[in-house]
């Protein structure tokens, strides 16, 4: 049995963080959570997770800045990043991809979609489906 | 013969020696006479003096009793008495025909003739006999093969007989007379020529100094009349394109006044005939010729003959000179030559006059044209003297109260009649600063040869007017810039129109920009609001999905439905805030004013919020002397809650949050100071703007409606107060709200609320 994939989750809203945890409870991932970008980046540098699931709008360091920092660090640059955002507009999606998103999940989300996106990036896919 | 003469002389000398002495005396006498005469001739004395002297000498030297000089009159074919001397001189014939008597014969034969016995001779005339003459001698006065006249001497003495000795002496005297006559002729000719030269020079002067045809043409006409012997002269001016002659004046206005005719077509009348043929025309009898019109005019003035001459310039007919008289015109070559000079003068005069009149006409045309121009036009020479100004220029500068252009105010200008400006410079007309500025511009144009353009604003009777001026040099045929012209166009209306259009465009553009800004802000707002609404929606949708799809136990069910309920309430609150803000912005929110104790209200809110913010240290600084406010209690509560919530949200790491309330210059001053993330200085005001603040996610990374601070500002302003933010010296932000305190003495009704509830 392969060890469970380790995923860093960054989300400042406690309700949504809880929803993420419950939704992914049975998917067999190990979730490491942070409530903003700064905490998230520290966690990523320390844990070297298999994937990152992050909100875009967060205090102190938002998801885009976090992605920039990850992509700028050669040791971390290869980790897939899934953006979770309430902004579903094409412009925001494109901005996310420019900052290094691997996949994009919009709020509100279905838990099946969230799990599919994580499975997809963990399988090594790097080009996001439209 | 010698003896008889000696006896005649009554000499007392002895006979033999007397004869010699007499001869010697006579010789001496002759020499003296000849000398006197030659001196007279050489001195070019008057012909009469010479003739008298010569005749007296001749009579006395040959011992005659009477003598005469007759001159040949070629025109009449007669010998005419010029001088007479001695006895019966009064009855000496005034005229002698050729071949008549001794003198007529001598003239015909060009030789001296002696007749010592008239009674027996066929040459004895009735005169000679009636005068009692016994002997006579006639000598021709010869010069260059021509006989100019006859010198004749007669004697009553029966014993006196003329001989060849006498004739030789007389021929000598006649020779001298001939020289004198010839000299006199030459003198007269010289005098005549001099007179003509004087006349010509007078005419030239007249032509060159006078441009008035009415004075020049009659002068020329009078000169022509004088040399041709005409009675009067008239000029007809030619209009070649129209083939018409127009009466141009005459030497005798009285005579020509009767001539009703003032215009002639080419071919009409004698002048018309000359105009057509361009040939001089001599008519000896206008009634026989028939070309001249109207004939009754001629008969009324007793005129009969005419000489009509064309006055040409190149191939072009300028005028006709018509000389009218009573005797046929037979001008000599010299007279013709002189006439031609006159005609040349006339041509010059007419040309000058027509040039002048066309120049004057051009000038008048120019003046009229520029006078009707709506632009102000002026022309100045190189020295800055005005050569021309138009009516608008005069009006404009006479009406100026004040002129400003690049150089500042220009003084009042008073300009009188247009003529008074001509010849003046700007320095004569305008204040120094303006004159100098104008002069500089003029000089620039004259120096560079390039037109310049500039705008100037003029105040005319309290009406600001703008002129667009263009200055350009005038250049003569040799390329010299000799004047500078200024044309100033009133562009006030155009300018006003342009300004109005520009203003309208600016207003339109501003409105468009405002609309675009609003439109963008609204769409941004919609995007953000929908984004914010999605957060609670995500919880509602996610937990309800979990409850539906996953087997959950009762505890979890309760927990999730509590989450759903909380998120639904959050959503509801957000919607209410949004609606509140809209109402306040639309001005449809009414305040329920009552006495509010702000210090107590702040303290109560802090106390109830504390448990929700375990990481923050909340404290209050309340000014105990702060009086109650007249405020809407619920709205003021909303203000304090929002300020506190904002401080908590923006200091996610915790820290101290201080709420203050104190009186400050007639207002209640609320402050909320945090140690949080702070606000970039350039966004301090944006956080109070519902639309613009949301543009950058980085400035507002906190969840919520984002409407808290805009609501704070709206409520503060509804109360007549203000709301603003400032950066703290260390870190974090302080938010300020002021609310007006009631004026002192005003008692707010009711017990202050705030401490309870």
Image (spheres, grey):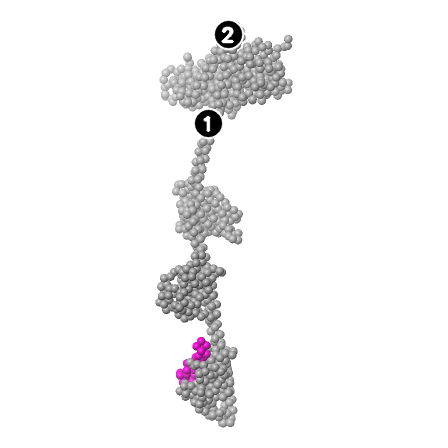
Q: Is residue B88 magenta?
A: yes
Bin the neighbour count of mark 2 within 10 Å (Cα to Cα): few under 14, some 14-19, many 20 and up.
Answer: some
Marks 2 & 1, CB-CB < 8 Å contact: no
Residue B124 location, quadrant: bottom left
Residue at mark 2: B557
**Vertically, is B483 above or below B533?**
below
Residue at mark 1: B515
Residue visible at 48% across and 46% down in the picture: B471
Residue B381 rendering spot, x and y as whole percentages: 48, 51
Residue B117 rendering spot, x and y as whole percentages: 45, 89
Residue B258 location, quadrant: bottom left
Bin the neighbour count of mark 1 within 10 Å (Cα to Cα): few under 14, some 14-19, many 20 and up.
Answer: few
Element at badge 2? helix
Residue visible at 52% across and 7% down in the picture: B556
Q: Is residue B112 in view?
A: yes
What residue range appears in magenta? Answer: B69-94
Q: Of marks 2 and 1, which one's residue comes earlier in the chain? A: 1
């Amino acid at each position: 049995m392969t060890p469970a994939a380790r995923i860093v989750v960054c989300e400042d809203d406690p309700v949504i963080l809880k929803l993420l945890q419950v939704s992914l409870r049975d998917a067999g991932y190990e979730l490491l959570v942070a409530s903003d970008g700064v905490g998230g980046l520290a966690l990523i540098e320390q844990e070297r997770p298999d994937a990152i699931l992050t909100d875009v709008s967060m205090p102190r360091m938002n998801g885009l800045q976090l992605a920039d920092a990850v992509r700028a660090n050669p040791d971390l640059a290869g980790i897939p990043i899934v953006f979770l955002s309430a902004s579903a507009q094409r412009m925001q999606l494109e901005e996310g991809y420019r900052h290094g998103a691997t996949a994009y999940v919009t709020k509100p989300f279905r838990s099946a979609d969230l799990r599919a996106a994580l499975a997809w990036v963990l399988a090594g896919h790097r080009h996001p489906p439209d | 013969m010698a003896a008889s003469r000696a006896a005649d002389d009554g000499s007392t000398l002895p006979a033999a020696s007397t004869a010699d002495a007499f001869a010697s005396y006579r010789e001496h006498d002759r020499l003296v006479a000849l000398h006197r005469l030659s001196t007279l001739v050489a001195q070019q004395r008057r012909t009469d003096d010479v003739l008298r002297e010569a005749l007296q000498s001749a009579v006395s030297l040959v011992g005659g009793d009477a003598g005469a000089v007759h001159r040949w009159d070629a025109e009449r074919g007669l010998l005419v008495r010029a001088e007479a001397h001695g006895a019966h001189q009064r009855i000496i014939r005034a005229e002698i025909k050729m071949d008549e008597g001794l003198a007529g014969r001598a003239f015909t034969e060009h030789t001296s003739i002696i007749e010592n016995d008239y009674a027996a001779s066929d040459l004895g005339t009735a005169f000679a006999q009636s005068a009692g003459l016994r002997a006579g001698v006639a000598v021709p006065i010869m010069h260059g093969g021509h006989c100019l006249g006859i010198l004749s001497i007669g004697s009553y003495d029966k014993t006196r007989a003329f001989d060849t000795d006498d004739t030789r002496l007389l021929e000598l005297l006649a020779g001298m007379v001939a020289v004198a006559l010839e000299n006199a002729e030459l003198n007269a000719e010289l005098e005549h020529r001099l007179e003509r030269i004087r006349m010509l020079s007078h005419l030239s002067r007249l032509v060159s100094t006078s441009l008035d045809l009415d004075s020049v043409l009659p002068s020329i006409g009078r000169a022509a009349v004088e040399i041709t012997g005409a009675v009067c002269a008239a000029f007809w001016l030619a209009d070649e394109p129209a083939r018409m002659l127009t009466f141009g004046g005459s030497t005798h206005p009285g005579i020509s006044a009767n001539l009703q005719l003032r215009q002639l077509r080419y071919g009409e009348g004698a002048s018309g005939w000359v105009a057509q043929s361009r040939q001089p025309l001599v008519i000896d009898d206008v009634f026989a010729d028939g070309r001249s019109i109207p004939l009754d005019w001629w008969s009324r003035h007793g005129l009969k003959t005419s000489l009509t001459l064309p006055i040409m310039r190149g191939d072009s007919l300028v005028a006709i000179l018509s000389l009218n008289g009573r005797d046929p015109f037979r001008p000599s070559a010299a007279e013709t030559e002189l006439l031609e000079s006159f005609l040349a003068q006339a041509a010059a005069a007419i040309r000058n006059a027509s040039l002048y009149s066309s120049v004057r006409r051009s000038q008048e045309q120019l003046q009229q044209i520029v006078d009707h121009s709506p632009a102000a036009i002026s022309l100045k020479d190189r020295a800055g003297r005005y050569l021309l100004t138009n009516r608008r220029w005069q009006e404009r500068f006479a009406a100026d109260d004040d002129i400003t252009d690049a150089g500042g105010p220009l003084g009042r200008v008073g300009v009188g009649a247009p003529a008074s400006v001509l010849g003046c410079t700007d320095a004569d007309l305008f204040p120094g600063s303006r004159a100098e500025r104008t002069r500089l511009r003029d000089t620039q144009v004259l120096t560079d040869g390039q037109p310049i353009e500039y705008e100037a604003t003029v105040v005319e009777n309290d009406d600001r007017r703008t002129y667009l001026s263009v200055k350009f040099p005038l250049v003569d045929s040799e390329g010299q810039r000799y004047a500078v012209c200024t044309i100033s166009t009133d562009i006030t209306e155009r300018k006003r129109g342009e300004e109005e259009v520009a203003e309208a465009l600016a207003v339109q553009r501003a409105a468009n920009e405002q609309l675009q800004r609003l439109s963008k802000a609204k769409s941004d707002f919609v995007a953000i609001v929908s984004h914010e609404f999605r957060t609670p929606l995500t919880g509602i949708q996610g937990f309800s999905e979990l409850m539906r799809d996953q087997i959950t136990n009762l505890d979890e069910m309760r927990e999730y439905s509590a989450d759903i309920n909380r998120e639904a309430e959050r959503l509801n609150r957000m919607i209410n805030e949004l609606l509140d803000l809209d109402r306040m912005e639309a001005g449809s929110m009414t305040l329920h004013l009552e006495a509010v104790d702000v210090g107590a209200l702040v303290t109560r809110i802090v106390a109830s919020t504390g448990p929700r913010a375990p990481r923050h240290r909340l404290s209050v600084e309340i000014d105990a002397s702060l009086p109650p406010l007249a405020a809407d209690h619920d709205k003021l509560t909303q203000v304090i809650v929002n300020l506190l919530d904002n401080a908590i949200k923006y200091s996610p790491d915790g820290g101290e949050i201080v709420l203050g309330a104190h009186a400050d210059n007639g207002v209640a001053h609320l402050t909320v100071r945090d140690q949080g993330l702070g606000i970039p200085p350039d966004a301090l005001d944006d956080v109070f703007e519902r639309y613009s603040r949301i543009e950058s996610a980085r400035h507002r990374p906190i969840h919520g409606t984002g409407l808290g601070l805009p609501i704070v500002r709206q409520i503060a302003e509804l109360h007549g107060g203000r709301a603003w933010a400032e950066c703290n010296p260390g870190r974090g932000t302080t938010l300020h709200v002021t609310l007006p305190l009631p004026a002192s003495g005003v008692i707010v009704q009711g017990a202050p609320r705030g401490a309870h509830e």
